[in-house]
Each structure stands twice: as C-alpha cells, then as structure tokens.
Amino acid sequence: MLRIAVPNKGSLADASIAILSEAGYKQRTDSRDLILIDNENGVEFYYLRPRDIAIYVGSGELEAGITGRDLLIDSGAPASELISLDFGASTFRFAAPVERDWNVSDVSGKRVATAYPGLVGAYLNSLKISADVVRLDGAVESSVRLGVADLIADVVSTGNTLRQAGLKIFGDPILTSEAIVIARKGFDIPGELEILIRRLQGVVTARRYVLLDYDIEKVNVEAACAITPGLESPTISPLQKMDWVAVRAMVLRKDTNRVMDELWSVGARGILVTDIHACRL
C-alpha cells in the first residue's frame, strides 16, 4: 500500500487535505487522527509535522509527501520535487537595519538569523559567502534589535512586520516556495504514485483554467482563436445558423474577463464560462 505524508498543521495542512479530497482520496475529519487508510485507492496517509516530512520521505519510510519547497531544501534530505501544487506560496528575502544600504556581499562575516538555517546556508554557499547562520524558531524580526544577529533571512509577504522592526529588504529573493509533492531521490515511482500525481495535476489544472464557449461568424474565427488558442487547439463546431460556428477552449481563470472583452470586440456572442472540476491532460 502506498504511504503518503500530509502536513498535520500550519499553512499547508488544510489546503493539502482539500486538494487530496478533490483528487478523490479519503481524508481525515478529526485533526487528532495521525493515520488514515484509504482502502479504495490503496493509500495510507500519515499526518506529520511539515518540517519532518522530507526526512521521512528521504529515508524511504514513506513513498511520497506534500511539503513546502522551503522545507525540503532546509531539511537537506535526499528527496526531490515531483510536481508543484499551486498553493502555499511564500518568498524568502534578506532584511537588515534601515540605517544603511545593503548588498548581498555585505552579508559576508555577519550573523544571519533565520528559522531556515539549511536553506539560507545552502544559498550563501552557492554565492561563496561565509556568514554565521543563527537558528531561531520564531520572532526572527526581533533578533537584530535584541543583538542576536546583524540581519535576518525570512518569509516576506507585505513587509509591514519588517518595517515595524526597523528592517528593510535587500538583494534578490533567496527562494520562492510553494507546496510540492516530493519523493526519495532515485526512487522508482510505483503505479499508485503515478496515479496520485496525475490526479493532483488534474486538480491543479482544473483550478487554473475554465472552459470558454462562444459563437462567432466564420470570417472572424481566426481572430477569435488567436485570443483563445486553448492548450492544444480550440474545438470548433458548426451551427445551424449559416456561416456561424461554436468554439470551445480552455482559458486561464485569471484572464477570463479580459478574454471575454476581446472576444466581444471581434464579434463573438453567447460567451459562456464553465468551471472545470477535474481533468486529465
């Protein structure tokens, strides 16, 4: 039976359970449950601390797991990313006191506070920068004011917390992270895991896209299809009305209203948008 790790708490937990449920897998309803067996799909789900998942998967105790890209890199475990899941996005940046201008080269010889020492250490090594990485489990922003560090490396969203602590962002992002599915490096992926990956990828695609249907005169089809090329090619069907056709194509959800406006401007009418609940592409 396939053994899969799922985050049991934190920002990835609920979203991980949601995407697995949408993919057709049974999930726990009681947060105290540590193991759930889905006999129908031949999968055992283990609910673990997000930071531990890469360790379990890398050691081979579990075949795969859902975790953050940041946590995978920070762990140093012999596991690799299979697919990204399009949720749990975060960006890691350096931040330092506002009193001076900073460059990444200025990090050399300094104390860097972070909750992700493995990730930050690997990044500094890739730049051949030597610094003292100070591990903290929380409240990293306070470390400079309290004299524990000279600067920090942490997750940044709006930057408001940093500004309140008298810090400013500098340098390029250290990492852009999101939820991913991981497996042990060199692991031969079994059929059950291939199915799980394909299902999850189908959910990710269904969330990103909608189906767009519209009617248009044949003389304007080329212009309309340039707006809605679809993933491979739009579907075009004849209508009873002479010289008109019906077109169907997948469109990115975020572009829906702009695409509808552009289609209307080239003569499309009867434009309809439909959610996609699942797909295999």
Image (spheres, grey):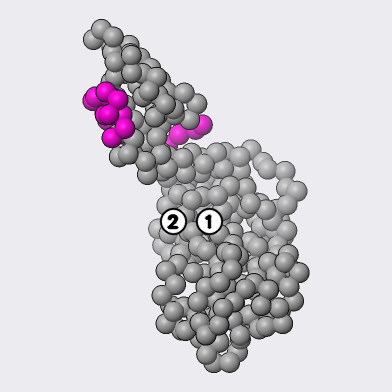
Q: Is residue 183 above or below residue 123?
A: above
Residue 173, given in percent of the width and then of the height, sits at: 57, 64
Q: Is residue 118 left or right of residue 20?
A: right
- The verdict on residue 272 being magenta is yes
Please report the residue visible at 49 percent of the width from the left and 32 percent of the height from the top. 280
* 183 to 139, vertically: above or below: above
Residue that label 1 marks: 179
Residue 266 lies left or right of residue 112; in this view the side is left
Give the magenta-colored segment's residue range. Answer: 261-281
Q: Does residue 172 show up magenta in the picture?
A: no
| SS for dot 1 | strand
Image quarter of residue 71 = bottom right
Q: Nearer the viewer, residue 217 or 50?
A: 217
Instruction: Name the kind of residue labelled 1 in the image.
Output: Ala
**Whether residue 168 can be seen here:** yes
Q: Position of residue 161 (x, y in %)?
A: 43, 77
Which dot, 2 or 1, sits closer to the camera?
1
Q: Residues within 10 Å of mark 1 (few under 14, many from 20)?
A: many
Q: How many marks?
A: 2
In contact (CB < 8 Å): disc 2 and disc 1: yes
Task: Where is residue 53? Give x, y as percent.
Answer: 61, 62
Residue at the spot of label 2: 15
Closer to the N terminus: mark 2 or mark 1?
2
Q: Identify which amino acid the numbered label 2 is placed on.
A: Ala
Asked which quadrant contains residue 106, the reply is bottom right
Residue pictured at 40% horizontal, 29% vertical: 228
User: Disc 2 to disc 1, how far (Cα)?
Assistant: 9 Å
